[in-house]
Amino acid sequence: MKSIYLTCILLFTFTVHAQTGRESQIDSLENLLTQKIHDTTRVKTLSELARQYGGVDSLKCFKNGFAAIALSKEIGYLKGMAISNIDLAGGYLDYIDTENAKKYFIKGNALADKLIKKDSTRDNLKIWLRGHYNLGVAYGFEGKVEKEIELAAMTIPIAERMGDKMFVANGNTNLGIKYSNRGAIEKAYELFIISQKQFEEIGGPEDLVYHSLAFSSCLYSLDSLPRMKMVLDIAKKNLDSIPNSFYAPKYYGELGLYYSGIKEYHKGIEALDKASSYYKDDPKNYLLSLIYQRYANIYEKTGDFRKASEYTIKYLNRLGPEHLHEDIISSYPQLGRYEAKLNNYKKAYEYLTDYVVVRDSMRVETLDSDMQNLEIQYNIAKKEKEILGLKNEKNEAALSLEKKKSQGYLLGGIISILGLLLFSGFYFYKRKLATARKKELEQEAEVQVLKQEQQNKIFSAMIEGQEKERKRLAIDLHDSLGGRLSGISMNLSKLDKDEPKVYPKKQLQKVMHDLNDSLTELRSVARNLMPETLVKFGLQAAIKDYCSSMTGSETKVTLQFYGNDKDININTQVTMYRVVQELINNAIKHAKASEVLVQFIREGNQVHITVEDNGIGFDKNKDLKKKNSGMGLSNLQTRVAYLKGNIDFESEENEGTTVNVHINIDAA
């Protein structure tokens, strides 16, 4: 998880500032300053220059930022003061100076608050959004992730209502990164999926590279390595169109991580070598720490503990005083393990000793702080006790024996009342506990009854479906195959009765043609009962075969199959096949679609089936509630419920239909 955090710092640092053609934009802005322009335009130009120089030239960044602030104050330009303070804060953030970044973000945000109270136009709201969102980023750099997520969650919905798609896409990706850091990988995955669609719609090459590299780390944590490779391929395709991109070393770092995951360690080392080569002129770059960690991880997996130890030491030597003790502590046991594998037991013992010393020093620091707090509390209590003692001494002479007796009686009465209250409280607590337990048992019984009723409904629906299937089969055999065979029988009987003197070639050809049609019909009925391709070659081949059979001159059915069908039992495969079959039939027969896209994605034990068509669609609020919709929806829902999955429909009239099915193979 530490590796992912370093990745996030790299990615966000360039989210706002790194755009293709920055040099030409800077030249254009510098040229504009030499011309005679209005003061408000000059403020905006100076502020934009501060923003563009961020992470490139700190001197010019701050010079232009402070000049913009001074001029906007001089002319009383509220919007300019807000923009210049926020852009100057962004400059400090580029250099990881979080204290000054927060200071100027807070100033800029306060001015932006005043600005939108007077004029809440789209342009002013974008300034407000940028300031508040990036203040959260500054908190995130300090480890205050809760505060960062809070500010992101406040700003992203506003940007969404404004229609600022790029802000929303960047915001969702960065939220995904933060949730990954906190271990909420599933939540992070959902956000990355959303922002991927958004970037594909409106993003440029660098936006897609930025998102893909962040997403790849999340997919590695999910052990979804095939999907990780697909995402890295997207990054590489866009990276090739950006000369001298600062994302190149990050791409090779992620590629090294991928090869480590699929155990192609030689390729992993080659990728990390490419990543580190970008820093040969910048050996102090903090991102080398991430690369050193990954080198050590690969060498440990290959059994080269000497190299693993060497890169772990390089990682330790790069950690400065700003790093947490946990970063250092976690490395010492690893070094001890490597040296033990190399039979350097003395060195291993020294590393473990260092580990204990550093860990104890953390405890001592914590203990010192706690002891200081306790000492303060003790001194306060001691003084209060001394004051109370002096008061008692003054009043002691005035106390009489009768007053003491009264106090004794009063104390006895209080004790008796407290005892009675305690007994009453305990008695009522026991009764409440028993009532709650009884209610809990009743609720559990109700849940079991509901579960049983649901199960009965599923089995009843399955039996009803089987009966309908048998009825359909009987009709097919009687009306189609039976009719053809009756015709063949009559033709043969006629030949036998007529006893032709000339060889009846035409009549026999007709009989052969009818027999061939009957065989084709029989195969079709058999395929509907149990697809032969499914039994012989598996689910993927069966679905592919069915899609091909449904593709004709008026309809095109396309299949995209990701993953495999290994370890899925045959009953589950057959049910999944029936679901896909029913969805395709609905799209062609009822929706009158000319194009149907079928996606089957398996990731671990999760299967996602999507069938999308360009048909006439339907009103799901009305049609899904009808008992006899004519689309087999009830049968579909029964099959998915049998697999303990869920199904949802997205459709509008004349807009096509998308059906999503989610199945957990373990549950099924």
Image (tube, rainbow, N blue to C red):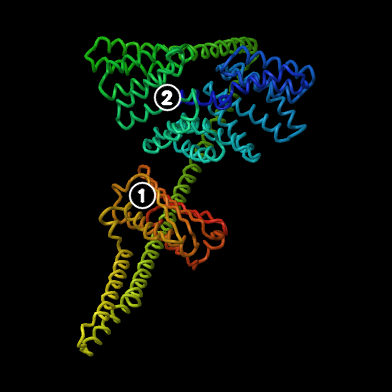
* Residue annotated with mark 1: 667
Judging depth in this view, the residue of 211 and 412 nearest the camera is 211
Image coordinates for residue 263, horizontal then vertical, percent: 29, 30
Query: Residue 3: which disc?
Result: 2
Residue at figure coordinates x 31%, y 78% from the top left: 484
Tag 2: amino acid: Ser
- Are there few (<14), some (14-19), or many (20+) residues within 10 Å of tag 1? few
Give left or right: position of 123 versus 352: right
Residue at figure coordinates x 58%, y 20% from the top left: 93
Residue at figure coordinates x 66%, y 13% from the top left: 63
Image coordinates for residue 462, horizontal then vertical, percent: 37, 64
Tag 1: amino acid: Ala
- CA distance for labels 2 and 1: 33 Å
Give left or right: position of 340 versus 154: left
Image coordinates for residue 648, horizontal then vertical, percent: 48, 53
302, above or below 640, in the image: above
Quarter occupied by residue 79:
top right
128, above or below 486, in the image: above
